[in-house]
Image (cartoon, rainbow, N blue to C red):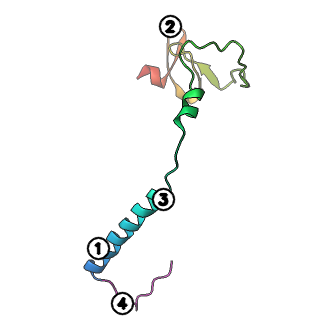
Amino acid sequence: MATDYDAPRKTEDEISEDSIEELKNRRIDKSSGIVDVDESELAESLELPGADLSNEELAVRVLPRQADEFTCGRCFLVHHRSQLAKEEAGQLVCRDCAA
């Protein structure tokens, strides 16, 4: 952005007045953007623990473990080889579990 060095500069009082006016304007703008939300719709979409999900299907594509990945022997998550911290009793351990 180009700066006009010949333009008159504002004093600190003018700058503080400008910023106060900007804050007042922002407060007015924020209150105009408030949207009413019907909470009854939100409550219907929540799942309760122990709910019957037997008729639900997951659409997740599961990939087999790749050659550069390993399964942690403690958390049983698949990690990239760069996350390997150590090997204990024949089990590979990730950095998170080793910490």
Q: What residue is shown with label 3?
A: 32
Task: Residue 95 in the image: state x and y as whole percent.
Answer: 47, 25
Label disc, if present, on residue 16 of the rendered structure: 1
Q: Earlier in the sequence, mark 2 or mark 3?
A: 3
> Residue 55 occupies which quadrant of the picture?
top right
Q: Earlier in the sequence, mark 2 or mark 4?
A: 4
How crowded pointer 3 is (Cα within 10 Å; few <14, some 14-19, many 20+) is rated as: few
Q: CA distance from mark 2 to mark 3?
A: 63 Å
- Towards the viewer: 50 or 92: 50
Q: CA distance from mark 3 to mark 4?
A: 35 Å
Q: CA distance from mark 3 to mark 1?
A: 25 Å
Q: CA distance from mark 2 to mark 4?
A: 75 Å
Task: Residue 1 in the image: state x and y as whole percent.
Answer: 51, 77
How crowded pointer 1 is (Cα within 10 Å; few <14, some 14-19, many 20+) is rated as: few
Q: Amino acid at mark 2?
A: Ala
Vertical relation: 21 (above or below) 43: below
- Towards the viewer: 70 or 21: 21
Q: Earlier in the sequence, mark 4 or mark 1?
A: 4
Q: CA distance from mark 4 to mark 1?
A: 17 Å
Q: Amino acid at mark 1?
A: Ser
Task: Residue 54 in the image: state x and y as whole percent.
Answer: 69, 12
**SS at mark 3 in the image:** helix
- Towards the viewer: 4 or 78: 4
Farthest residue, direction bottom: 6
Q: Earlier in the sequence, mark 3 or mark 4?
A: 4
**SS at mark 2 in the image:** loop
> What is the magenta range?
1-10
Q: What residue is shown with label 4?
A: 8
**SS at mark 4 in the image:** loop
Q: What residue is shown with label 2?
A: 89
Q: Amino acid at mark 4?
A: Pro
